[in-house]
C-alpha cells in the first residue's frame, strides 16, 4: 500500500497517477482499468489538465468517478490550467485573472466536482508580475474552488517571489510545483520549449534545502530507457528530449546494470529514483496498461540507497 505525503493542507499518495491516454470515450475501458488498479494499490491522487486531449481528459475523469461511485472525499484531484493555446507559440501565455478562473471552472464542470484539491498553473510567464496571479489564486481558494494551489514549470525564483508576495499580503501560497524530474536529463533548449523548466542543479539545490514538495513528472523518461535497454528504435520524442545528450545513454547503461544486479525492473528503479532522491518528491506517472503499472509499482517493495542513486547518476558508489 502507498504511503502519504503532505502538499500544503492536502494529503497525497506516494505516487500520483497521470492522465496517460485518458480522454476519448473509446479509451475508457483501458484507462478505467488502470485507474481501478491504482485504487487497489492504495493510490488517491489523480492528475488532469484542460490541455490534455482538448479537455476530454477532465471529462473522462468525471465519467470514471461517476461510474465507480467514488466518494469524492476519498480521492485527490490535481487540475491544471493556463497552458498556452497554441503549442507552437508557447511564449504567448495565458495567465490573466480571467483565464486562471475560467480554466479551473471549466475543469470543475467537466469533471463534475465542486473543487480541486490542487489547482496548478500549467506554465509561467516570468515577464508578468506575480501580484494579480497570486491574488486570483487566493480568491479561488477562499471561494472553495481549490483547497490549495501550485504551479508547473515555474523556476524556483518565481516560486520564491510569488510566495514572498503571498506572505506579505496574507494570501494563499503556492504549495507545490510539477517539474520534469527523471534520471533522464534534458533542457528547455533541447526540448525546444521556452516554458519548459526541467530539474537542474540550481533547482534541485533549493528543493533539497527548502523541502518544498514537487510532483515529479516524466520519471520513466517518456519510454526512452525502455527503448534503449531493449534495442528498440528511438522515437521522435527521444530525439527531442534525451537522445542527443550523451550522458543519458550512459545512464541507460547504468540502469540496466543496476536492474540486473538488484533483480528489480528498470521501470521500478526509475520510479524509485524520483521518489527516493534527496528532495520531497511525489512521482507523477501515467500508464497505458495494468501490466505497465504493475511493473513500475514494484518500487513499492524497495527503497533505493544513496549509493545506488549516486551510481545511477555518476557511475560512482555501490550498486
Image (tube, rainbow, N blue to C red):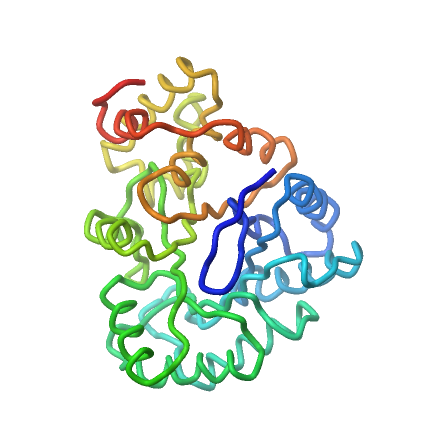
Q: Residue at x 58, y 79 (%)?
A: 144
Q: Residue at x 38, y 35 (%)?
A: 273
Report which quarter residue 61 is drawn in.
Answer: bottom right
Percent x, y of residue 220: 44, 38
- The vertical placement of 301 against 158, above or below, is above
Whether residue 204 is visible here, answered yes or no, is: yes
The answer to which of 62 and 175 lies nearer the viewer is: 175
Residue 72 falls left or right of residue 211: right
Percent x, y of residue 154: 32, 64
- The vertical placement of 239 against 116, above or below, is above
Percent x, y of residue 254: 31, 22
Q: Residue at x 37, y 80 (%)?
A: 134
The answer to which of 241 and 4 lies nearer the viewer is: 4
Locate the C terminus and report the quarter of the image it occupies: top left
- The vertical placement of 213 against 148, above or below, is above
Residue 209 falls left or right of residue 19: left
Residue 113 falls left or right of residue 124: right
Amino acid at each position: 500500500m502507498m504511503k502519504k505525503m503532505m502538499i500544503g493542507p492536502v494529503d497525497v499518495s506516494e505516487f500520483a497517477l497521470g492522465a496517460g491516454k485518458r480522454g476519448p470515450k473509446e479509451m475508457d475501458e483501458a484507462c478505467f482499468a488502470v485507474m481501478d488498479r491504482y485504487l487497489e494499490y492504495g493510490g488517491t491522487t489523480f492528475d488532469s489538465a484542460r490541455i490534455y486531449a482538448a479537455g476530454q481528459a477532465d471529462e473522462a475523469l468525471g465519467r470514471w468517478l461517476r461510474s465507480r461511485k467514488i466518494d469524492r472525499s476519498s480521492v485527490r484531484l490535481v487540475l491544471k490550467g493556463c497552458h498556452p493555446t497554441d503549442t507552437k507559440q508557447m511564449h504567448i501565455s495565458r495567465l490573466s485573472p480571467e483565464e486562471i478562473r475560467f480554466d479551473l471552472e471549466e475543469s470543475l464542470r467537466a469533471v463534475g466536482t465542486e473543487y480541486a484539491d490542487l489547482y496548478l498553473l500549467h506554465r509561467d510567464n516570468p515577464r508578468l508580475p506575480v501580484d494579480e496571479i497570486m491574488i486570483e489564486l487566493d480568491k479561488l481558494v477562499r471561494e472553495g474552488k481549490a483547497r490549495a494551489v501550485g504551479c508547473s514549470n515555474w523556476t524556483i525564483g518565481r516560486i520564491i517571489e510569488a510566495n514572498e508576495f503571498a506572505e506579505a499580503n496574507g494570501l494563499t501560497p503556492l504549495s507545490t510545483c510539477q517539474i520534469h524530474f527523471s534520471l533522464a536529463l534534458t533542457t528547455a533548449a533541447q526540448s525546444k520549449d521556452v516554458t519548459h523548466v526541467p530539474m537542474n542543479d540550481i533547482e534541485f539545490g533549493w528543493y533539497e534545502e527548502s523541502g518544498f514538495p514537487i510532483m515529479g513528472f516524466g520519471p520513466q523518461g517518456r519510454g526512452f530507457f525502455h527503448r534503449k535497454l531493449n534495442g528498440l528504435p528511438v522515437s521522435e520524442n527521444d530525439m527531442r528530449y534525451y537522445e542527443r545528450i550523451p550522458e543519458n545513454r550512459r545512464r541507460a547503461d547504468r540502469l540496466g546494470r543496476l536492474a540486473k544486479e538488484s533483480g528489480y525492473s528498470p521501470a521500478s528503479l526509475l520510479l524509485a529514483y524520483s521518489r527516493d532522491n534527496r528532495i520531497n518528491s511525489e512521482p507523477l506517472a501515467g500508464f497505458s496498461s495494468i501490466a505497465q503499472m504493475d511493473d513500475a509499482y514494484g518500487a513499492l517493495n524497495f527503497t533505493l540507497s544513496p549509493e545506488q542513486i549516486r551510481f545511477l547518476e555518476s557511475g560512482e558508489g555501490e550498486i
